[in-house]
Each structure stands twice: as structure tokens, then as C-alpha cells.
Image (tube, rainbow, N blue to C red):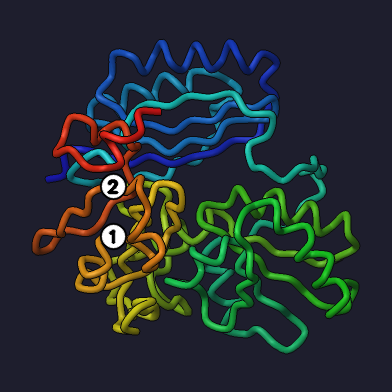
């Protein structure tokens, strides 16, 4: 039985004093067995957390006592360990770095998982399916037939939407869009409405909820997640491996952060090539002076996101640690 639970949620709601809410959240979490990444903005909250089972229940009950958060839909998964390094609760001007504030009341129509599957079954030439996540997310998994834009970060989406408007008729073409948990679609669908796209559908609860309710139907590969797991199957159904090592082209869904701390690029690699490259994404990075030491994966283990450089000061001395103490 899993000793922990991973909890993810977001909620768009007015928070009159977000700085006070940051303090309130920190104070409550301080005594719990938790690792978390929580962002508080004037227009809501967005969180990824891992709790011991007992403390997770305490937090959910506490949060739902607040009328602002009473209607939140939580995504909860059991797991055998924490999936985040520490507790981080921060104020942000906006929940996603979009550099604009579209009217969320004018966003796309939310579509539940079962209906989404039916729409995919029946999708015709008058409908475009868009994966609105970053390219490193969609490369390891996406819906069949989806357009996967070359997006490096959230801020790239508005320019993509503008270019899409020049390729298709925004008045006649139906748009189906999806993301990991739903929050990006809330923003992006509203933005596309402002740009003149008339018919937009967004997957309610994102790919996470779809996998829980429907399984792998129409889905290929795995799901990228922003925690220590990095990639997960969306359901217990057998999943297809669609991504490959960037060095030898062997099928893999193992992500590594480049050991060069001034690069830190996320790249796909099989364990064998990662060891050969000493955890680096290129030969140039292998010559870098600030490199994290590479740790060979034990059998059955998967790589985790990078650790900050100062974590290595107490470990085996390495030229990056003894040379640079910034």
C-alpha cells in the first residue's frame, strides 16, 4: 500500500490579499509531512503536492473549509515516496506566464472525458486537435492526430495562436485543445476566443482526468509531469513507447537534465548513452566546469530532475563544487 499521495489542483478565484494567503498556506503546511509547489496569484491558486496519506486528508479538509476553494476538483494518485524536493509557496502575478489576462469567462467549452473520446472517434476535417503543452511534453505522449506546436514555454502560445489564425478559418474550424491538468486550456482557450476563434472545446481535467476515466483510448505514449517522476502512464492500460534516445535512437522515455549546470537542458536518453555522456546533452557540455556528478541508475530506477548545485558540496568533491561557490 502506498504511503503517500500526489495531489494536484488549480482554482481560478479572487484572492484579495495573495501575500497573506501565501503565509497562511505556509503556516498550515509547516507541521505536515509534505513536499509542495504552490503558486498564489490575485486570480487563484495552482498546486502540485505530495503528502503522507494522513496529512493529505488534513490539508484537503482544511482547504475546503475556505469558501474560495470549496469547489476545487482534486487529482489524487497514490505513490511510494515524495515527488518534490521541498515545500515552496510563492506569490505570482499570474498563475501561468502568459503576459496577458484574457477573460476566463469567455473561454472554450469544457468537455468531459467520455464525450472527448466520442469527439475524437467522430472528428472530421472541420476540426483541429491541438496539444497546447510545451514540445518536450508532447514528444513523449499525445493524442493521435494532434498538432503539437514547437512551444518552449507558456509565453510562446500567443504567437502560435496568431500563426494558426493565418492557416485556418477561425470562424469555421472547430478547435479541440488539451493540456496536462486543464489550467493552460482555461487561459489559452480564452485567448483564442479574443483572437477570433469561435468554436473551442477544452478537455476538462486535462489528460490526467481523461486517463483516470477513459484509459488510453486515442492516446499514444506517456504523460510528462512536473515532478520527480517526469513521465507516467495515464492509466493502467498497456502504453506505447513513442519517443527515442537523442543519441542512439533507441526507444526510451527517460528524461535527464544536462549535468552542465549552465545548460541544464532536459533531454531524452537511454540509460546507456546517458552514462556514456556523463549526464550531458552534448560533448560541449561534457567539457563544462560546473557539472553535477553523474549517478548511474540502479536497476528499475528512473532519473529524477536535477538537484541544485549546492546539494553536491557535501558529496564527493567535484571541480564544479571546489571551483565555484556561488
**Figure check: 86 above or below 205:** above
Q: Residue at x 56, y 15 (%)?
A: 21
Question: Which residue is tagged 2?
Answer: 292
Task: State the image coordinates of residue 179 (x, y, percent, origin top left).
Answer: 56, 59
Helix, strand or loop at disc 1? loop
Measured in 3D between alpha carbons, the distance from the residue under mark 2 to the one under mark 1, in whole angstroms, is 8 Å
Which quadrant: the N terminus? top left
**Figure check: 130 above or below 67:** below
Q: Residues within 10 Å of mark 1 (few under 14, many from 20)?
A: many
Question: Which residue is tagged 1?
Answer: 279
In the picture provided, is 292 more to the left or to the right than 315? right
Q: Quadrant of residue 83?
A: top left
**Figure check: 38 above or below 187:** above
Asked whether the residues under the numbered discs 2 and 1 touch, taking CB atoms below 8 Å apart as contact, a structural biologist would say yes
Task: State the image coordinates of residue 123 (x, y, percent, origin top left).
Answer: 65, 83
Q: Residue at x 27, y 76 (%)?
A: 238
Helix, strand or loop at disc 2? loop
In the picture provided, is 204 more to the left or to the right than 4? right
Q: Residue at x 65, y 52 (%)?
A: 154
Task: State the image coordinates of residue 265 (x, y, percent, origin top left).
Answer: 45, 57
In the picture provided, is 151 more to the left or to the right than 296? right
Along the line of sight, the residue nearer the viewer: 28 or 312: 312
**Figure check: 169 above or below 74:** below
Q: Residue placed farthest to the left in the image?
A: 299
Amino acid at each position: 500500500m502506498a504511503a503517500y499521495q500526489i495531489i494536484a489542483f488549480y482554482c481560478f478565484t479572487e484572492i484579495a490579499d495573495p501575500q497573506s494567503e501565501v503565509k497562511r498556506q505556509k503556516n498550515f503546511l509547516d507541521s505536515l509531512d509534505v513536499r509542495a509547489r504552490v503558486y498564489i496569484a490575485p486570480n487563484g491558486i495552482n498546486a502540485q503536492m505530495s503528502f503522507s496519506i494522513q496529512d493529505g486528508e488534513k490539508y484537503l479538509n482544511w482547504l475546503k473549509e475556505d469558501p474560495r476553494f470549496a469547489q476545487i476538483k482534486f487529482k489524487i494518485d497514490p505513490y511510494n515516496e515524495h515527488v518534490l524536493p521541498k515545500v515552496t509557496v510563492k506569490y505570482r502575478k499570474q498563475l501561468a506566464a502568459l503576459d496577458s489576462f484574457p477573460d476566463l469567462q469567455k473561454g472554450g467549452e469544457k468537455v468531459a472525458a467520455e464525450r472527448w473520446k466520442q469527439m475524437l472517434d467522430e472528428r472530421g476535417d472541420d476540426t483541429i486537435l491541438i496539444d497546447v503543452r510545451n514540445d518536450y511534453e508532447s514528444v513523449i505522449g499525445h493524442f493521435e492526430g494532434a498538432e503539437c506546436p514547437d512551444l518552449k514555454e507558456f509565453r510562446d502560445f500567443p504567437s502560435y495562436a496568431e500563426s494558426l489564425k493565418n492557416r485556418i478559418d477561425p470562424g469555421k474550424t472547430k478547435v479541440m485543445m488539451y493540456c496536462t491538468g486543464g489550467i493552460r486550456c482555461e487561459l489559452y482557450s480564452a485567448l483564442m476566443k479574443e483572437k477570433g476563434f469561435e468554436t473551442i472545446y477544452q478537455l476538462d481535467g486535462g489528460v490526467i482526468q481523461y486517463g483516470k476515466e477513459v484509459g488510453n483510448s486515442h492516446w499514444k505514449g506517456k504523460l510528462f509531469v512536473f515532478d520527480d517522476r517526469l513521465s507516467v502512464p495515464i492509466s493502467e492500460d498497456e502504453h506505447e513507447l513513442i519517443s527515442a534516445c537523442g543519441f542512439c535512437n533507441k526507444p526510451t522515455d527517460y528524461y535527464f537534465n544536462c549535468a552542465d549546470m549552465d545548460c541544464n537542458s532536459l533531454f531524452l536518453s537511454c540509460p546507456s548513452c546517458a552514462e556514456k555522456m556523463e549526464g550531458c546533452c552534448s560533448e560541449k557540455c561534457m567539457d563544462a566546469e560546473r557539472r553535477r556528478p553523474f549517478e548511474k541508475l540502479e536497476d528499475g530506477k528512473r532519473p529524477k530532475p536535477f538537484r541544485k548545485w549546492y546539494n553536491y558540496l557535501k558529496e564527493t568533491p567535484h571541480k564544479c563544487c571546489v571551483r565555484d561557490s556561488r
